Amino acid sequence: MLEKNQNYQELMNQLVGLRYPAVAMKMIKDESEVPEDAVRPLRDMGHIALCQAFAFARRQGKVIYMEKEDHWCWNPIITYGLIDNETAKKGFREMHKMLGTSMESADAYVDSFPSLPYGEYKGTLIAPLTKADFTPDVTFIYCKNDQLRVFLIAIDSQIHQMVESSFTPFDSCTYAFLPAFQEGNYRITIPDPGEFERALTPEDDIILTVPFQREEEFYKGVETALKRQSRNTFYMTMKEEFARPTFYNVIFEAWGLQTSEVWDKEKK
C-alpha cells in the first residue's frame, strides 16, 4: 500500500508539481490499526488543532494519530463523533450563557452541525501520502487554483460532468472531510481562518478532497491528463485575435463568424 500511495503522489507531482504531498486520512476504530511510530500530540508534542496535524503531515512528513484528548479545537471533536450530543450541548450552553444568548439556540446549533455517530470511531490517522502505509478514507490535496483546474480536467476525463461543492469560510476540517467521506464524492473546500492563522496554509491554497470510492477513477484521470500533457497546454497571453484550437473554427464557421489562425500545440 505504501508503494501504491507513493506512486500516486509521483503521478500528481508529474502533472502539476504540488508544493507539498497530499494528506491521507483514515478513521480508526481500533488502535491496532495505528502505526507504532505515529505521533500522539498530547504525549509527544502538546495539543494541536486538526488543521495543524494536516500541516505537520504535509510540511514535515509526520504521521499523526489523534483521539479526543489530543485536539485543541472544538470543531472536529463534534464532527468526528468523539463526543456525545448532550455533552456537546453542555459546552455550547455555557458559551451561549457567557454571550447572553438562549440555551435553545445553543442546542439548535449543535443539532444542526454535521457529525459522525458518537463512538463509531476512536480517532483519526493522518499522514503524508508518501508515508501512508494504509488505504486512506479520504485524501486532501492542498493545491493552487491553477493546479485545481488541471485536476478537474483529469476528473472530467473520467466522469464528464461537473464537480459540485458548496462553500463556507469556516470549519474546513469538517467540510473538506465529512461530505466526501459519507457520500463518496469529490469536494472542494476553502481553507478556513484557522488553517491560515495556525496551520500556515498559504493564501493561494485550496483543498480538493478525493474519497476512497473515487481513488482509482481520480488517478486514472491524472494518468490520462499526463498522456495528453494537459499541464502544458495553458500559456498566459494577452493578445487580440489569438490563435485558437481547430474546433473553435469549426463552430465559428458554422455560425457564419470569422475563423482564425489555429493554435498548433506542437509548436508551443
Image (cartoon, rainbow, N blue to C red):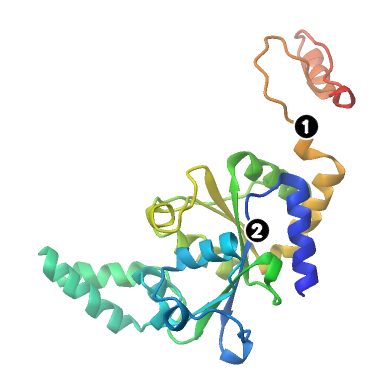
Q: Point out residue 59 in the picture as x, y percentages from the top left corner.
A: 57, 59
Front-lying residue, 19 or 218: 19
Residue at (68% x, 72% y) in the render: 132
Front-lying residue, 10 or 76: 10
Front-lying residue, 102 or 96: 96
| Picture quadrant of residue 264 | top right
| Picture quadrant of residue 259 | top right
Q: Point out residue 182 in the picture as x, y percentages from the top left corner.
A: 56, 70
Q: Quadrant of the N terminus?
A: bottom right
Residue at (77% x, 7% y) in the render: 258
Q: Residue furthest left?
A: 100
The answer, for residue 85, to whether it is visible in the render is yes
The crowding category of the residue bearing disc 2, from other C-alpha atoms within 10 Å (few below 14, some 14 to 19, many at least 20), is many
| Picture quadrant of residue 238 | top right
Amino acid type for the residue under numbered disc 2: Pro
Front-lying residue, 198 or 184: 198
Q: Which residue is mark 1?
A: 233
Q: Secondary structure at mark 2?
A: loop
Q: Is residue 248 above or below residue 94?
A: above
Q: Is residue 15 left or right of residue 100?
A: right
Amino acid type for the residue under numbered disc 1: Thr
Q: Which residue is mark 2?
A: 21
Q: How many marks?
A: 2
Mark pair 2, 1: CA separation: 24 Å
